[in-house]
Amino acid sequence: MRQSNLFAPTLREVPAEAEVISHQLMLRAGYIRQLAAGVYTYLPLGVRVLRKVEQIVREEMDRAGAQEILMPSLQPAELWKESGRYEEYGAELIRLHDRHDREFALGPTHEEVITSLVRNEISTYRRLPVTLYQIQTKFRDERRPRFGLLRGREFIMKDAYSFNTDWDSLNQSYWGMHEAYTKIFNRLELNFRSVEADAGVIGGEGDTHEFMALANIGEDIIATCTCCSYAANLEKAESGPRTISSTDTAVNDVEKFHTPNIRTINELMLSLQIEAHHIFKTLIYLVDGNAIAVLIRGDHEVNEVKLKHYLHAQQVKLADSATAEQVTGAPTGFAGPMGLAIPLLVDQAIVNTPHGIAGANEEDYHVRYVRPGSDFPLEHVGDFRNVTEADPCPRCDNGVLDFYRGIEVGHVFKLGTKYSEKLGAVYLDSTGKEQVMVMGCYGIGVSRLLSAIAEQNHDEHGLIWPSSLAPFHVHVIPVSVKDTQQMKIAEEIYQHLLRKGIEVLFDDRDERPGVKFKDSDLMGIPIRIVIGKHATQGNIEFKERINSESIIMKIEDSLLRTLELVNIN
Amino acid sequence: MRQSNLFAPTLREVPAEAEVISHQLMLRAGYIRQLAAGVYTYLPLGVRVLRKVEQIVREEMDRAGAQEILMPSLQPAELWKESGRYEEYGAELIRLHDRHDREFALGPTHEEVITSLVRNEISTYRRLPVTLYQIQTKFRDERRPRFGLLRGREFIMKDAYSFNTDWDSLNQSYWGMHEAYTKIFNRLELNFRSVEADAGVIGGEGDTHEFMALANIGEDIIATCTCCSYAANLEKAESGPRTISSTDTAVNDVEKFHTPNIRTINELMLSLQIEAHHIFKTLIYLVDGNAIAVLIRGDHEVNEVKLKHYLHAQQVKLADSATAEQVTGAPTGFAGPMGLAIPLLVDQAIVNTPHGIAGANEEDYHVRYVRPGSDFPLEHVGDFRNVTEADPCPRCDNGVLDFYRGIEVGHVFKLGTKYSEKLGAVYLDSTGKEQVMVMGCYGIGVSRLLSAIAEQNHDEHGLIWPSSLAPFHVHVIPVSVKDTQQMKIAEEIYQHLLRKGIEVLFDDRDERPGVKFKDSDLMGIPIRIVIGKHATQGNIEFKERINSESIIMKIEDSLLRTLELVNIN
């Protein structure tokens, strides 16, 4: 394509509204434009990348035996009421009324629609399993849309759903999708991890894995083992057992001491000149309305998801200070594990500590030499905390946990019978008995991937697309369009490469070389062929976007090198 | 693909809700399913056809120099208020509020969004012209969604917009798109006409053409010349001059006669034993609130669009009977052209008639021998009627008009400055002077095309897809999956064709042959290879869906014939 015709308005300034580099560069290089908060138009360069990502996703879905369908965005509210999510989904679900005042939702996801489709069309085990997918626009009224395509209100997803006769069959579909996702993200040349995740609010039972693109701006923390393949998100990650080697063998009795106005772990550490892991931190939670206490080490954080699972609770939240004061008898900052009348959940790491310092349940007092088991009960011991960096791996003997930030780009999920039960998706098994279908769902954030890939592939000058995704493979740039010899050679190279099936952007604009190179760097086309002063000797400057230096080479060599690098099959 | 895995639920019964054959067959053959009125899910077969249509559209758009973008469905209401369409569009525009109570529209079309995009990004004549397109889901809350994909509330369109410096440039873009559309519909093997149409309610000025797929269920009537290339929709079609050869040379004076309770053209015809073209029909209209009379022949229909244009009116509607009685002095059925105090618009065909019978503006009376010019004024003469079949062509001397029904599948439209003025899309011309951009818009009903194509390609047994659009090129059907030799041959044919890049559906289901053939006919795959009793002699049955008979041929021959017919390039 001739660049003089290309609609790719580039910006020299960094747009004020863009906080992260991928967003800045996609705006500056003319890939996207914002229409409203979290709502974007894809310009020609953006669409070209988008279509390539979609095509890779489509090919691997097809190869894995999934079948493409296309479901509507307009979804009757009745279906969402059947599943119970019409209320549950909250403000993220965009609701509307049609001209007959019937309620609709704009699909943020399609469990209801697909389950209703399959319940109507499949009634026998002989038509199962089946995995259906679509690549389609989703709507979620995010409270805080941000980072460009990373968290939008209108975005493109690939969502797939499997319908299985039983959990064994679901496992096969699930791991088939897991494998397909791995292939997709590899083909996208993404630096990613598949991490164990918590089933969380989508509901359902069983395994779930998130595919995380590693990036500093990621909203999620993931923990990976330095030795084995263990990886999990922070909600889910566990640590192996570890005891603090204690040189302190004294078996002193509990001792109360005065700590006026010392309420936080930090204040205690400063005042007593001790480290946080010597402190036992007591937190009061409301669990479905009932108060409980949780005891963890001062250097640890409570993991509410783990609490929820342990207690089979719907809702877990920190108690307000009035409640805390009522159950501990002391104001915030002085709660302790001793003598409580409410259930006390003790984190495993506490049990491994001989003794510690804790609140005295009395204003301005703490206690020391508090021993697990002797001074407070160990009826409820478990893993109630977030792992920390350098915690031992829960799977292998040698590794410790490393932390990364990740962008969730994919998610595979065992839904079980959550939706099929509510919506009545049943089938007759081989004995003629009615059974409930078992479901899985599998999502990829297609438009979000553009952000994730850009976040991993750029430098200070602009984007650096992998060849398989680049809007064009080659950027052909004559230094001066007024130089007829340069233009003739450039045109020949352009035509030659086009004939070979290579996507070429030909910068035929009458612009200064500096402008052309700046635009080229911004856009991030992998190969650049510059026809300049060496043209008279039959040479061009060949530069890969990923390298800082260009190489002077013969025109013929540059063509061969290009074919080699692009490697179209 | 193996049919045992294909999610394509077929129906034996004709679904009660489907009125037209294309809708019935797409439901029965498992291409689509309805989710809500006018809202459909595309099943795997439907998606395969849809993607092929999209790809043809995309290729021809790209070839014509248009650039693909993708705009959002969520459109801020402010933009629609700027263009003045937020109120004007009425109930078809789906409106919603986001969580911050900001108003949005779900895009039924994208003039506002694209004009706002281009006004922000292009400011100089050097970046013009540009044509941008998208293939995207549209939302229109149709009052009466019907005929499956033909008139839906959520549907897929290709919409393109050109931005030009002036009308000459717009003409180039316009005819470039017209040519691309012609190529697209030819590649889709559609029986279509490009017809002149009225600019109508979208607004703007100048030419507009509709691309009509000919079909009996079409909602539009189009008139085409039997000799030349003239074609127009009924709103727009004109007829050439024609005089009624009259043998009646009497010059009698106007004569009033008693016609008790005879109010309609039909009643007059019966009572007087005359033909309708001898009657002058007087209709009272309200034009932007003012009453006028329109006089046309009894066998003609008023064309309100032509009235509107003649009178430069916003709104034209038949007057209520009270108004009619007030201005004519007679109840409905007895209005006539003589002695009216309101403007009288006389259709050209009346002027060409020596005399006729008309209402007397008096209850229960008509008049005969009423002569144009003598008995009523000819101040306002024009073309105020719909053409009729066999009217002379307005363009050539030899042809007459034929009527067809058509489905509008494409539309090219000169918008002029309607949107660019309202939204301030201006540029600096080569002299540095600010000018308003001139726009064109160009739509193709992508999902609707599936219905139009199906409407033109079917028989009583099912669909008959053109090879370029079929979900699969070849249907390989072993008569009995229990016959190992049949299955071995079928598998070999399947694998052979797949290797050649042909899309094959392999009916590996353990079903009776009758069921398999019925399903195959329904689905409409162009080539069928049946491996049955002749397999032992190395023969198969080869059948093109479009032919009623199958041919026994050698396996090798059938493979060659298939490659020839599919002709993948």
Image (cartoon, coloured by chain):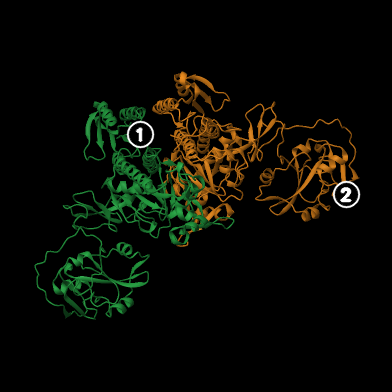
Chain colours: A orange, B green
* Along the viewing direction, whichever of B378 and A229 lies nearer the viewer: B378
Which quarter of the image is occupied by the N terminus of chain A? Answer: top left
What is the x, y in percent for residue B278?
A: 16, 69
The amino acid at mark 1 is: Glu
Up/down of B242 relative to A4, above or below: below
Q: Label 1 neighbourhood size at 10 Å, few (<14), some (14-19), many (20+)?
A: some
Residue designated by label 1: B503
Q: Residue at x 61, y 33 (%)?
A: A460
* Along the viewing direction, whichever of B549 and B251 lies nearer the viewer: B251
The amino acid at mark 2 is: Asp
* Along the viewing direction, whichever of A33 and A305 lies nearer the viewer: A33
Mark seen at residue A259 = none
* Along the viewing direction, whichever of B294 and A368 lies nearer the viewer: B294
Q: Tell me if residue A412 can be seen.
A: no
Q: Label 2 neighbourhood size at 10 Å, few (<14), some (14-19), many (20+)?
A: some
Q: Chain of mark 2?
A: A
Q: Chain of mark 1?
A: B
Which quarter of the image is occupied by the C terminus of chain A? Answer: top left
Q: Is residue B77 left or right of residue B284?
A: right
Please determine if labels 1 and 2 lie on a single subunit. Answer: no
What is the x, y in percent for residue A209?
A: 58, 37
What is the x, y in percent for residue A134?
A: 46, 42
Residue designated by label 2: A364
- Residue B275 image-quadrant placement: bottom left
Q: Secondary structure at mark 1?
A: loop
